[in-house]
Image: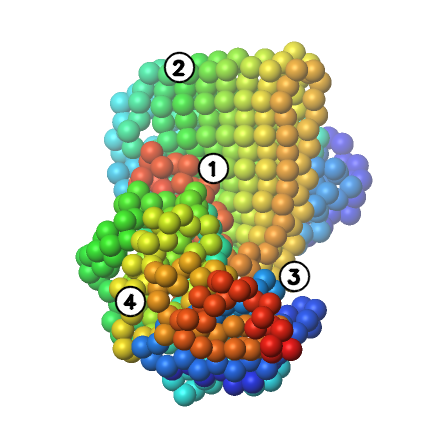
Amino acid sequence: MLEIKNLHARIAEDGTEIIRGLNLTVKAGEVAAIMGPNGSGKSTLSYILSGREDYEVTEGDILYNGESILELDASERAAKGIFLAFQYPVEIPGVATMQFLKVAMNEQRKYRGEDELTTPEFMRRVKEAAAELKIAPEMLRRPLNVGFSGGEKKRAEILQMSLLEPKLCVLDETDSGLDIDALKVVADGVNALRSPDRAVVVITHYQRLLDYIVPDTVHVLYKGQVIKSGDKTLAHELEANGYADIIGAAA
Amino acid sequence: MNMQQAIKMTAAETALVDAYTTQIGDLPGDGSVLSVRDTLVHELRTAGLPTRRVESWHYTDLRTLLRAVPDADPTAFADRVDALVPGSTVLSVRNGGAEVKGSLPEGVIVRSYVDSLLDGSAAAGLAVLGFDDAIGRINGGLVRGGLEIDVAAETALEDPLEIQLVQSLGQAHTRFPVTFGAGVTATVIERHLSTDDAESFVSSVSDVTLAEDADVIWIILQQQGAADTHLGQIRFDLGKNAKLHLFVINAGGKLVRQEIHGKTSGEGADFKLRGINLLGGESHTDVTFTLGHNVPHTTSTEIIRNVVFDRAKGVFQGKILVAKDAQKTDARMACNTLLLSDDADLSAKPELEIFADDVQCGHGATVADIDHTQLFYMLARGIPENKARAMLVNAFVAEIVEELEDHEAVVEALEGVISTWLDKHA
């Protein structure tokens, strides 16, 4: 589903290279965890996958279902099924949450040549998904993410993810700022979306989240490269021994 | 008559003076009114239109910007349109000609301003506010229509009163002296719009008085055509504990100046100004505001949101004057702007002049582009860039409209105006 080949990318503004020859393959149905110390390029990778214009790809390619997505802008990538759950979901005063959800769902449908959702059908879907994630109706009446607590913001991200039904989900540090109860709710939401035709990339600092979203593969990112890949036991190893051994071995 | 000609008149100045001389004998007014008109037109002839050397016109050099004035066409009458807010009482003014007909809500008395010109009672009100009051001068010289509206004390108007000024071509010069009695609650929509693309020149002055405890929302919605010149002015005087919530929305016109001049005359008075300027094309739009906090314990807040596209230019001048005795004044003014093209331009000039020593006053101005993090977030959810931008611009101004949440139909109507404009320009 996702193939990243020898990817090099830098910050557009100052030319700082962040991703330096990254290779990664994630198959449909797979949950891949990407771990790594601070500054290894984890969040940058998530932005590059979703098409943020602040970064430039200088070499290599990203294939999604066999096709390069480098020429697509962020909204086209999203409409094709790539979803980024933000580490810091953005507050947008003046845009009502419900309006935002409806526009996003319908714009994606339009792009794919599908009919727009009727209002009752839209309401039904939102109500169901919100109930699953224990999101109170009052929250949906507020402007998007405005005044939401950290946990509410993360749940709102997962709500968007379940409503938009993406094929490739990228979760950027979704566990940061969550207490254990909120973490479980979020993890349940992600697990509910696991399916043979959907891939999930979980970017995280800590092994903790992976107790709840159990990965099929674990990849260690360091200085913009994947320096080691393994199964879920690799995450436990990292938890016990830290990154130093692996980094030392790779160097 | 003093025939001294101090300046060589521009085409526009000549046209305005000619509009007066050709209509003389036809313009309504008794001897006292005609003598005021003569004085005003004489001043226009000798001093000309204001230039950038006049401080209050520094960013809107009217003499240069106003290239031509179309001839008055007394036979033109634009068609009236549906009320902005369903259920409103519409007072129709077509090409400057006001009609007094139809049923009015209880407590509302309307009479033709022409009658006040004819019997001379309008004469005192025609005086200019100062030497730089070019709008008052042009309007006072040429006014030939309008309405006098009195809302009796304790009247609670459920539905809005819409003063609907529809313009097709030519000129229109109107006045609206309006008094709200004690304890009145009312919503008035002063709506200026054009039915076609023909060039027109409009001046309109509203003179609003709120008695004790009156609570009024006044909305000025300006949607003139892309070739039109619109010179608007509202004056207001707030009595004890009176509340005026003034909304100014500019969403049209080529050359626009809306002046707002007010004062608090009774303790406890509260004034709110909320302005939305939607500017595009090659237009020039100026909102100039002065407020005198003249007595103790009065409050005001002013929030202006400007959205500037294309090669449009915007101006906001806001001056709050706190008199020596006006202790405990609380006044806050903010002007926030989104500049959406490299050629867009906005000048903001907030001023405070404070003579009292125990007051809370502040002002601030911001200018920004669309927030790129917000834009990326919306794109990352599959919303195409043009749509996402329109939503963000809309959000920037929608916040202001939402303050009217107790008046759902009004909010809906104004949101409609804004989104229609953005669909065309964003």
Q: Nearer the viewer, mark 4 or mark 3?
A: 4
Check disc 2 and give the amino acid type. Answer: Ala
> Which of the numbered marks, if any, corresponds to residue A193?
4
Q: Mark 2 lies on which chain?
A: B
Check disc 3 and give the amino acid type. Answer: Asp
Q: Is mark 4 on a helix, strand or loop?
A: helix
Q: Which residue is drawn at 34% across and 48% down?
A: A181
The mark tally for this picture is 4
Q: Position of residue B147 (x, y in %)?
A: 42, 31
Q: Residue at x 33, y 16 (%)?
A: B154
Have a look at marks 4 and 1 and say if they share a chain. Answer: no
- Graded by Cα atoms within 10 Å as few (under 14), some (14 to 19) or many (20 or more), the crowding at tag 3 reads few
Q: Residue at x 20, y 60 (%)?
A: A121
Q: In this view, does A173 lie to the left or right of A137?
A: right
Between marks 1 and 2, how big is the CA–CA gap?
22 Å
Residue A51, can we see it?
no
Q: Nearer the viewer, mark 1 or mark 2?
A: 1
Between marks 3 and 1, how big is the CA–CA gap?
27 Å
Of the numbered discs 2 and 3, the one sitting upstream in the chain is 2
Q: Label 1: which residue?
A: B247
Q: Label 3: which residue?
A: B343
Q: Is mark 1 on a helix, strand or loop?
A: strand
Q: Do the residues labelled 3 and 1 touch (CB within 8 Å)?
A: no
